[in-house]
Image (tube, helix red, strand yellow):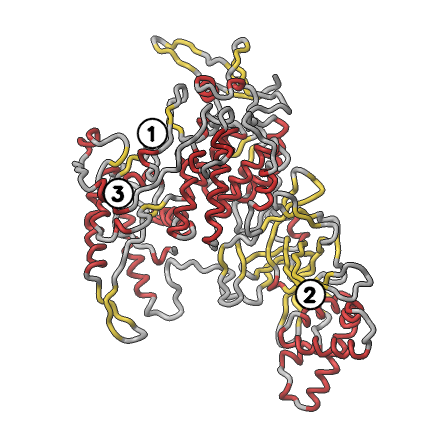
Amino acid sequence: MKRKYMMLSMLISGPKQPRNDIDIYLAPLIEDLKHLWDIGVEVYDGYREENFTLRALLFGTINDFPAYGNLSGYSVKGQCACPICEDDTTTMRLEHGQKNVFLGHRRFLPVGHRYRTWRKAFNGSAEQRLAPKGLSGADLFAKVRGLSCTFGKKFQKLLPKSGWKKRSIFFDLPYWKDLYVRHFLDVMHIEKNVCESVIGTLLNMPGKTKDNIKARKDLVSMGMRTELGPVKKGNRTYLPPAAYTLSRKEKIILCEFLEGVKVPEGFSSNIKNLVSMKDLKLKGLKSHDLHILMEYLLPVAIRSIFPKKVRHALMRLCFFFKAICRKVIDPQKLPRLQQEIVLTLCELEMYFPPSFFDIMIHLIVHLVKETLSCGPCYMRWMYPMERYMKILKGYVKNRSRPEGCIVERYMVEEAVEFCTDYLSNVNSIGLPKSRHSGRTEGEGIMGSKIFVVPTKEWEQAHLYVLHNTTEVEPYVLEHKNELMSLYSNRSDSWISKEHNRTFIQWLKHHISNKVDEDPSSVSERLRCLSYGPGIQVFSYTGYLINGCTFYTKAQDDRSVRQNSGVSLVAQSMHTSSCNDKNPIYANMSYYGVIEHIWELDYTKFRVPVFGCKWVDNQNGVRTDEMGFIQVDLNRVGYKDEPFILASQAQQVFFVSDPADKKLSIVLFTNKINNNIDDQYEEEIPTVDDPFVGMSQSLNNDSIGDDGYFMRDDHQEGIFIKKPLRFNVGQTTVQLNKKRRKTRK
């Protein structure tokens, strides 16, 4: 969804949105869409040199949740705010909080699940209802067909306050009622709002937290977890520590972890700038910052805090968003994903207050079904639209006439874009070109110098280049076969070591003899490879390749970014002992940091290589029960094989493990390289199913109907001061409440 392919078909003037009256503005667009479907337009095919009739279909609308209600005609406020559950939405009105909350996710569980019979851990009653079934497009059209709506601001008060308010103008399209999903739930805004609620509640951020005195009073009035009710202590009110309440020490651990995170270039903004250690709060968070926090950093940040049950529930929520936001999703695994998110929501109901469960939390339960019908969410979220809105706002130079500025500059840009198709050496407008585009061999960007390398390192780098070049592979096999015929009684490991020791000289003499016999039988590239590179190499501290920026560790230490982490999947030989004569070859992942960036000069071409300090997989790498890869960067191994080709490097970054400061957690970046067309797509190259380890540990958990809703490992609750009141003339002024945590 690039800017080039977005059309500004309509611009509604005015400082306020039309809300329910948007159908009036959409009428011309609907007429064009009907024409495209019924009649079509004649288009010329330049390849076949013939005309054909082009028809188009509106796949759906991409919008945030308030716009969902305006476009669909459903009221997304009030008790029945879910447009999928509709009248069967499980909702309640909080007496003190004065807001509608959406609990009852146990009804989405399979019949007979143990959570359905639990009472004390939830709302005091068992759950016997089944999950609501959404209406099909035909049933929905039959329901709204007879609705009449009078447009205009003076008739807004006559509209229903809940349910369907109108028959959407999109139903004028003949195929609209046959679509499985007509208006998409925006994963971007759902994830943003959920992460804000989680972070705000954990850090007790004013205006963001869902835990306050009203929430505790609602618990008491509902007869749920009455032990957490507010307690009067003099002029202050004390809120006992709930399962999600962090002590000051835990807040410091969480904030210090986020402040110490260094991410690769282009991965996200500098997380350190978002942390306020003075107030122990996060500030200035944007949508993408919350996306990175939710899917990458928060699961690691809470590893050493919270009781195990609460920590696992929050991690499962983060893992769900990470799984649902993938570009490649296996449809066969989506039912399992749905089961996991329902369990996660039920467990969150055990720990968090009812005020936490607003409509955004409830909408999570419908994301899997929508993904199954419409494909991965990256095709439907609002990130491209939000970026395009920034471009349109940049068109405004006269603030008194913003609409005119946008239209005028958009038309000029469209005309210029049309002309670029007939001009040579001109890039198209709206197709951003990355600085990595078209690069297959990479380019050094900083710290360039030339020096002579030691013989040992020269041989190590050259040998690795030979082993990973397609043209040399037949000679590698030939040399090993010669060694096995000469030393038939030797083990495979000895043959491998002898091959590494003698292959460079053997290949040089072998290719030289072939050139003397028949020069045309050896390519120029193979001849240069056999002669080896020069002893002088081009060294850099920064390098661009594979769509990523790589630094050496020394350069990383001086930068606010971390670009030195690399990973490599390679085939290795596994033996059970030194006497094992039948080794097994299998792929294994290696993790390390870049120490050197060199370009080996083979006269006719250069080959970039990374000299890395690799973590020993035998005692320095492990995977814990939650699926995190832990590495000890101080346990160095494979010193005889430090080099890899720069084109093979997969960028990773390491963050300190809060549970064990000696270890680091491996996090993968969101880019992988595609060697076919040199295009770099966003993907998450982690474990295929993030719930495997956690599901096993939670199934064996001893949690019971009593649940776990109160911290017993610390007594740092929340003290709320009594608000100050004073008179100014005849007006009574009440100061805002100030919350702080202290020891009981």
Which residue is under mark 2?
A: 450
Q: Crowding at label 2, few (<14), some or many (≥20) Cα neighbours within 10 Å?
A: few
Which residue is under mark 1?
A: 79
The quarter in which the N terminus is drawn is bottom left
Rendered location of residue 604, percent (x, y): 62, 76
User: Which residue does the image show at 64% across and 48% down from the upper left?
Assistant: 629
Foreground mark, 1 or 3, reads 3
Quick one: SS at disc 2?
Answer: strand
Q: Amino acid at mark 3?
A: Leu
The quarter in which the C terminus is drawn is top right
Which residue is under mark 3?
A: 140
C-alpha separation, residue under disc 2 versus residue under disc 3: 71 Å
User: Which residue does the image show at 75% across and 82% down from the upper left?
Assistant: 509
| Residues tagged 1 and 2 counted as in contact (Cβ below 8 A) | no
Q: Nearer the viewer, residue 518 or 264?
A: 518
Q: Which mark is residue 701?
A: none
Answer above or below: position of 103 versus 327.
above
Rendered location of residue 719, percent (x, y): 54, 17
Q: Nearer the viewer, residue 496 or 744?
A: 496
User: Which residue does the image show at 53% across and 55% down from the upper left?
Assistant: 671
Foreground mark, 2 or 3, reads 3
